[in-house]
Image: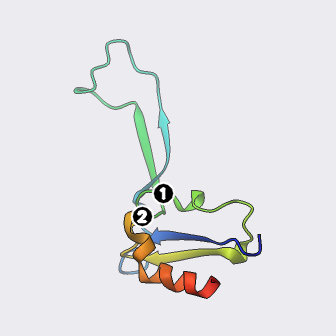
Amino acid sequence: MANFFNIRGVQIDNNAAIRNDTVNNQTWDWIAPNFDPNAGNSPIVDYLGPGDGTLPAWSTRLVSTPPGNVRTLLGDDIEHMWMMGHPQVTNALQMVI
């Protein structure tokens, strides 16, 4: 495990407050037999929290990774789809390679 690292992103606002824009968990309920998805409320409820816009921060690390090997990158431009090309990620990779 000494050579295994997790790099994860967390979106922040310009004022450095962590944004809660990523679905972190959901709840759902049974639907009635006459449920019409085009009318009425959805039985699925999303709860938002910190993350990279796609994956919640709590889930983007292997739980057995030593805390010193987890790199959490904060930025207002962190976006899941583009993280591998993000300067913070390439800098973090250079530090561990």
The residue that disc 1 covers is: 55
- Judged left or right of residue 38, residue 4 is right
Classify 10 Å Cα crowding around label 2: few (below 14), some (14-19), many (20 and above).
some
Q: Is residue 45 above or below residue 71?
A: above
As helix, strand or loop, the secondary structure at mark 2 comes to helix
The residue that disc 2 covers is: 80
Q: Please say if the residues under marks 1 and 2 sit with CB atoms less than 8 Å apart.
A: yes
Colour setup of the view: rainbow
Identity, as a three-letter code, of the amino acid under mark 1: Leu
Q: Quadrant of residue 75?
A: bottom left
Query: Which circle's residue, 1 or 2, is located before the other in the chain?
Result: 1
Rendered-image quadrant of the C terminus: bottom right
Q: Is residue 5 above or below residue 92?
A: above
Q: Observer-nearest residue: 15 or 10?
A: 10
Q: Quadrant of residue 70?
A: bottom right
Q: Residue at x 22, y 27 (%)?
A: 38
Rendered-image quadrant of the N terminus: bottom right
Number of marks in picture: 2
Q: Residue at x 71, y 77 (%)?
A: 68
The outermost residue toward the left is 38
Percent x, y of residue 81: 38, 63
Q: Residue at x 32, y 18 (%)?
A: 35
